[in-house]
Amino acid sequence: MSNSKEGWLKIKKQDQTKWHRRYCIIDWDKSVLFIASKVDTRYRDWIKLLPSIIINDFEYSFNNESNNNNNLSINTIEIIVDYGKSTHHLQAETKKDYDNWLLALKQTAYSRVGGGK
């Protein structure tokens, strides 16, 4: 298992209407997803990848709450933290990136407790 995964993802929190392109880094040792606006800059946000979080995967999803072009989510990963108090959506540009990010997130969050598949 590698010690990290990094690359560009589009990020949207539950209270946001727009997607934001961010550079993301998974640190396996710290079990954290760091989120930055640019490569090699200080992170803007982070998500602790604990076994208590929920990682939902869906390649295609339709959001009925939106009346604009942001309503179709393709290659999107949903991370629910703090027992449902906060939700983050991560969107990969390709199916391959989506699969790689999903696997890395699940392995980081769940493999220490016997899950991650």
Image (cartoon, rainbow, N blue to C red):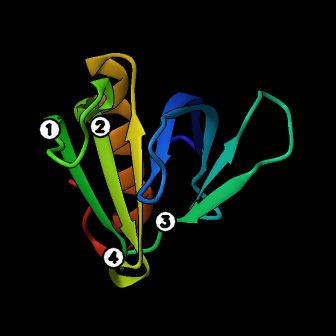
Sequence-wise, which precedes: disc 2 or disc 4? Answer: 2
Does residue 1 sit above or below 81 in this rendering? above
Residue 75 pos. (x, y %): 26, 29
| Alpha carbons under labels 4 and 1: distance apart | 29 Å
**What residue do we see at 47% from left, 45% from top?**
12
**Which residue matches tag 1?**
61
- Left or right: 23 as drawn, with respect to 114: right
Q: Label 2, secondary structure: give it.
A: strand
Q: Mark 2 sits on what residue?
A: 76
Among the two numbered marks 4 and 1 on one chain, the one whose residue lies closer to the N terminus: 1
Q: Identify residue type, mark 2.
A: Thr
Disc 4 target residue: 113
Q: Quadrant of residue 41?
A: top right
Q: Secondary structure at mark 1?
A: strand
Q: Position of residue 61 (x, y in %)?
A: 14, 38
Residue 6: x percent and y percent? 59, 33
Report the front residue among 56 and 18: 18
Looking at numbered disc 4 in the image, what kind of residue is underneath it?
A: Val
> Which mark is first along the chain, 2 or 3?
3
**Could you say which is closer to the camera, residue 113 or residue 87?**
87
Residue occupying image coordinates x 30% and y 19%: 96
Are there few (<14), some (14-19), or many (20+) residues within 10 Å of tag 1?
A: few
On the image, the x and y values in percent for residue 30 come to 65, 64
